[in-house]
Each structure stands twice: as structure tokens, then as C-alpha cells.
């Protein structure tokens, strides 16, 4: 398979949110009388979206200021729909259908099944909102109010056998609808994996919404992984299959460039990417602001125990 060398996704991001998209959305919100805070937008969007969300206060650090909805939904990495930040918002909304959507639970489990995403959400007991830091390996960051359910609940539904040690998650494959898959800008379908104890950590989350509204196509509709202590590329979008396996799966970026993108992908300011520093990050929506990157992206208390005794320089 022909694999193009990945674009240097290092620090080209000075481009920030494309002005036109940004302005169009602002204009739209203004007509609704919503040019105010992000939370005003969320309230209205939640009310009209038919998407009731309970805020889980245990996962809402008051010190975290959520990034504006406009930025979160127009500055995206979704290579199936282009390699720039601005293409996915257009190309993922041009004929690609994220509804209806079937999800498969498969592999070394007692309850293999295929079910509609809405039935899955119902089985998970609905959705809750959590505000998490979101740190891309490219050294930019946001704060996202995600709606969804804990991945641990999905693992419980699948009921893994003792031999299952890892969870492999796979994105859709539909080259007709996804121009990036036609161009083969990555090795598709996009795959990522977690150790089972990572998958059942309290932070691991499956997002089905943002700001109380169903998740837009460009952010990984109808469901995507969120592991806030890891770099964003772990957060596989538009998942069709959750497969429980005995052997450590190889993620798409690891296959592409193993020296640069490892299985663990834990946010670590002390281990640089071979081509740029990971000690600090650009704050999306924050103008020229850069901030210090935190160990495990600020979630050391919740996840450090998972990696005790491991060499994190080797296991990047
Ligand atoms: N999932 C799929 N299927 N395809 C992708 O290209 N990009 C990853 C991840 N999940 C990607 C993906 C990367 S590199 C990041 S940083 C996040 O999605 C970006 O998520 P966001 O656009 O919601 O910020």
C-alpha cells in the first residue's frame, strides 16, 4: 500500500481556526442572540438538540475554561476528510452519513453483538458531561465539554474473557465518502488500542456529544474515544468496532511512524517528539498563549498507577 509521508504536523498550526468558518458561525450565533459566552451557546444547543446531559461535577475542574464551541468544531484532525485542520468541517459534512450507525462488540468476550448506536447509548444509561483537557501530539491544546459515557460500561457490557488483555477500536471504512481514504493518506481503517486496565480507568470515555449537543461529524460522529491523559491521536473517531484481543494492537500512527508515535501516547512534557518539544503547548483560541504541558496532561492522580515501574521514555 502506498503511504505518503505524513505532513509535518508539528507547528504549522499557527493557522488557527479558519476565519471564514469562524465568522460564519459567529454570525449564525448572533442571529440567535447567542454571540455571548460559550455556555450561553451550550444551553441553547442543548435545549434544541434533544440531547439531555447531566453534568458530572466530579469531572469538571472549575479551573478549566472550556474552549469555544466554534474552535472545537472547526479546528480538527480527521485525515479521512483531509490533512488540514479546516477540511474536515467541510468534507465530513458533504454526503457522509454518521446515522444510522451500527457498532460491533467482538473478540474475546462473552457477549458479542452488533447494535445500533442509539441502543448502545440507552444500554449505557444515557450520557453525562465531563470537561477534559485535550492535548494533541502536535503541541496544541483545548478544553472540551464532552458528553458521553464511561468506556468501562461498554467493557462491562461486552463481558471480556480472561484472555482479553487489550481493546482494539476501529473506524469506518468507506472510501466513497471519505476522500482521505481514497487518497490513502494513512493506512485505513484508522485503528487505536488500549490496555484493558486503561480502557476501564475512570477517565476513559466514549463521547457522543460536545457542549450538550450531538457530536458533529468532523469531531468523530456518532461516537469517538476520549482518553484525556493521552495525546489526541489515541482518540479514534467514528468507531464501528470494539474488539477485545490478547495481543497489543498497533495503532495507525504507530504503523505509519513507530519512532514518533508509540502505543502508549501518554502526554509527557519530559519526552519530546523527535521533531519538536512536548514541554509546552499552544492554547487554541488563546491567541499567542502557550502554556506548560502537564504530566499525563494533568491527570497524574488518576492514571500514574497504570504505569508504575515502566520506563516512559521507552514506552512513549
Ligand atoms: N480518528 C480518525 N478516525 N482519524 C483521524 O485522523 N485524528 C486523531 C484523533 N482521532 C484522527 C482520529 C488526532 S491526531 C487528533 S488530535 C484527534 O482525533 C482530534 O480530535 P478533534 O478534531 O475532535 O480535536
Image: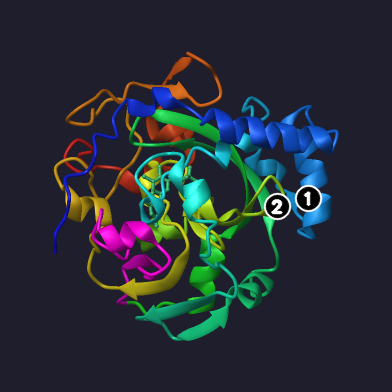
* Residue bounds of the magenta highlight: 163-191
Upstream in sequence: badge 2 or badge 1? 1
Quadrant for the C terminus in the image: top left
Q: Nearer the viewer, residue 309 or 212?
A: 212
Q: Is residue 8 above or below residue 218?
A: above
Q: Nearer the viewer, residue 134 or 305?
A: 134
Q: Is residue 9 left or right of residue 297?
A: left
CB-based contact (under 8 Å), mark 2 and mark 1: yes
Label 1: how many residues lie within 10 Å, few (<14), some (14-19) or many (20+)?
some
Q: What numbered label is drawn on residue 213?
A: 2
The magenta stretch spans residue 180: yes
Residue 161 seen in the current view: yes
Q: Position of residue 149 (x, y in %)?
A: 61, 59
The residue at which mark 1 appears reads as 46
Q: Is residue 294 left or right of residue 149?
A: left
- Seen at 44% across and 45% down, the residue is 87
Quadrant for the N terminus in the image: bottom left
Number of marks in the rendered image = 2
Q: What numbered label is drawn on residue 187?
A: none
Q: Quadrant of residue 140?
A: top left
The magenta stretch spans residue 133: no
Q: Nearer the viewer, residue 4 or 47?
A: 4
Q: Nearer the viewer, residue 64 or 78?
A: 78
Q: Is residue 291 above or below residue 68?
A: above
Q: Position of residue 79 (x, y in %)?
A: 36, 51
- Cβ at disc 2 under 8 Å from ligand 1: no
Label 1's element? Answer: helix
Label 2's element? Answer: strand
Q: CA distance from mark 2 to mark 1?
A: 5 Å
Label 2: how many residues lie within 10 Å, few (<14), some (14-19) or many (20+)?
many
Amino acid at each position: 500500500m502506498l503511504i505518503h509521508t505524513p505532513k509535518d504536523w508539528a507547528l504549522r498550526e499557527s493557522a488557527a481556526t479558519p476565519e471564514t468558518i469562524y465568522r460564519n458561525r459567529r454570525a449564525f450565533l448572533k442571529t440567535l442572540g447567542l454571540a455571548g459566552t460559550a455556555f450561553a451557546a451550550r444551553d441553547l444547543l442543548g435545549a434544541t438538540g434533544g440531547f439531555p446531559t447531566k453534568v458530572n461535577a466530579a469531572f469538571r475542574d472549575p479551573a478549566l475554561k472550556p474552549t469555544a464551541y466554534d474552535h472545537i468544531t472547526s479546528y480538527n484532525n480527521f485525515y479521512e476528510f483531509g490533512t488540514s485542520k479546516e477540511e474536515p468541517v467541510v468534507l465530513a459534512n458533504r454526503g457522509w452519513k454518521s446515522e444510522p450507525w451500527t457498532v460491533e462488540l467482538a473478540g474475546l468476550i462473552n457477549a458479542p453483538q452488533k447494535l445500533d448506536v442509539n441502543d448502545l447509548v440507552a444500554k449505557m444509561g444515557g450520557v453525562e458531561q465531563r470537561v477534559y483537557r485535550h492535548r494533541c501530539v502536535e503541541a496544541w491544546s483545548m478544553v472540551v465539554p464532552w458528553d458521553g459515557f464511561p468506556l468501562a460500561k461498554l467493557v462491562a457490557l461486552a463481558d471480556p474473557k480472561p484472555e482479553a488483555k487489550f481493546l482494539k477500536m476501529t473506524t469506518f471504512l468507506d472510501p466513497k465518502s471519505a476522500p482521505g481514504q481514497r487518497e490513502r493518506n494513512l493506512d485505513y481503517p484508522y485503528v487505536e488500542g488500549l490496555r484493558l486496565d486503561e480502557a476501564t480507568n475512570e477517565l476513559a470515555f466514549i463521547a457522543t456529544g460536545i457542549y450538550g449537543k450531538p457530536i458533529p461529524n468532523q469531531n468523530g460522529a456518532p461516537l469517538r474515544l476520549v482518553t484525556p491523559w493521552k495525546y489526541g491521536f489515541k482518540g479514534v473517531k467514528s468507531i464501528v468496532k470494539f474488539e477485545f484481543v490478547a495481543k497489543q494492537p498497533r495503532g495507525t500512527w504507530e504503523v505509519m511512524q513507530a519512532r514518533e508515535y508509540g502505543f502508549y501516547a501518554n502526554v509527557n512534557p519530559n519526552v519530546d517528539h523527535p521533531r519538536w518539544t512536548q514541554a509546552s503547548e499552544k492554547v487554541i483560541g488563546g491567541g499567542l498563549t502557550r502554556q506548560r504541558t502537564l504530566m499525563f496532561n494533568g491527570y497524574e492522580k488518576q492514571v500514574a498507577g497504570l504505569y508504575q515501574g515502566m520506563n516512559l521514555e521507552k514506552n512513549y
